[in-house]
Image (cartoon, grey):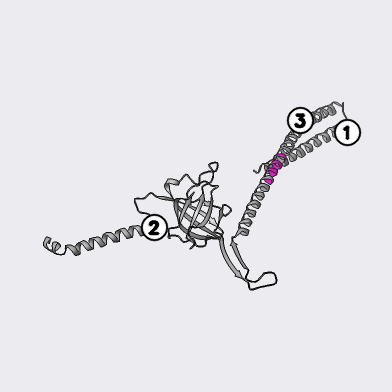
Amino acid sequence: MKRAIAKHAGHFGAVIGLVAVAALVGGYILHNQRMRFPWEGRTFQLQAAFSTAQAVTPGQGQTVRVSGVRIGDVSGVTLSEGRAIVTMDVDSQYKGLVHTDATALLRPKTGLKDMFIELNPGTKSAPVAKPGYTIPVRNTLPDINAEGAYLRTDGQVFAPKNSAFVGVKAEWSIWEWGASNALRRAAVADAAAARRDLEATERQIESDLAISLAQGDSARGAVDAAEKAIASAEEAFRVTQAQLKAGAATTTDLLQAESELTQARLNLTRAQYELALAHVAVKRASGV
């Protein structure tokens, strides 16, 4: 075995050299492709909604940067309700860096549209963005496409011969961004109006409940008064009957006492009915 190795030492060294070179090249390629090895720290994901995510290609080493310092990589892009949702894998060491008022800008790193995301992490007055948080489209800006043009004329009415013109066309979905801002402002106004309506409804409920409670107290007092009136009318009727037997009262007096007793009983029934209505009004006003 040793003799064979010694005999082919040159070939054996060449194979080892090729394997080493292949390992170095593979490691370099994987490093530039932003591949994460098991011994590296785990990441957490954030998302950003853009009106357009042209030239964003996950898995091509496109990075996420703050003030030029890489903090993560672009790992995915999906479509949701006409918006491009870009997923960012942020290194765990920057977990508390990004806040909910963060802004994001798509920028080209080269003239070939090798994109990266420039992230402004926001202010400390806003809450820290939790894993899975999506930066809204109102806080993001897509890349601006610029096109140059050169025109040489050979003489026109308003241009002298051999004059040259250079123009630049900037393309940016600013109207869509403005519309999103307008929708956000409209939503805030609707929420404020709904809050005012809710407060007005609560005040109305409190007022209705107070009125119903007052009506209930009044009806309860009327029932108590009617019960006392019945007791008084019954006693008057009993006395009149006794007087009639003793010859000290007439039949007319007895009929009058009986009529007053009947009226007192009717008043009690009416008061009990009003009290029942008041109980129903209280339950309705309190939502029971």
Q: State whether residue 192 is above or below residue 159.
A: above
Residue 100 percent location from the top left of the image? 53, 47
Q: Which residues are magenta?
A: 197-207
- In the rendered image, the quadrant that contains the C terminus is top right
Residue behind mark 3: 228
101 on left or right of 232: left
Residue 4 percent location from the top left of the image? 13, 64
- In the rendered image, the quadrant that contains the N terminus is bottom left
Under mark 2, the amino acid is Asn
Residue behind mark 2: 32
> Few, some or many C-alpha atoms within 10 Å of disc 1 (few <14, some 14-19, many ≥20)?
few
Q: Residue furthest front?
A: 161
User: What residue sits 60% from the left and 65% below the top?
Assistant: 166
Counting labels gives 3
Tag 3 secondary structure? helix
Pick the front one: 115 or 202: 115
Under mark 3, the amino acid is Lys
Residue behind mark 1: 252
User: What residue sits 69% from the left and 46% below the top?
Assistant: 197
Pick the front one: 76 or 274: 76
* Magenta span contains residue 199: yes
Residue 275 percent location from the top left of the image? 73, 38
Tag 2 secondary structure? helix
Tag 1 secondary structure? helix
* Magenta span contains residue 173: no
Which sits earlier in the primary sequence, circle 2 or circle 3? 2
Q: Are marks 1 and 2 in contact (CB under 8 Å)?
A: no
Q: CA distance from mark 1 to mark 2?
A: 118 Å
Q: Quadrant of residue 212?
A: top right
User: What residue sits 85% from the left and 29% below the top?
Assistant: 244
> Few, some or many C-alpha atoms within 10 Å of disc 3 (few <14, some 14-19, many ≥20)?
some
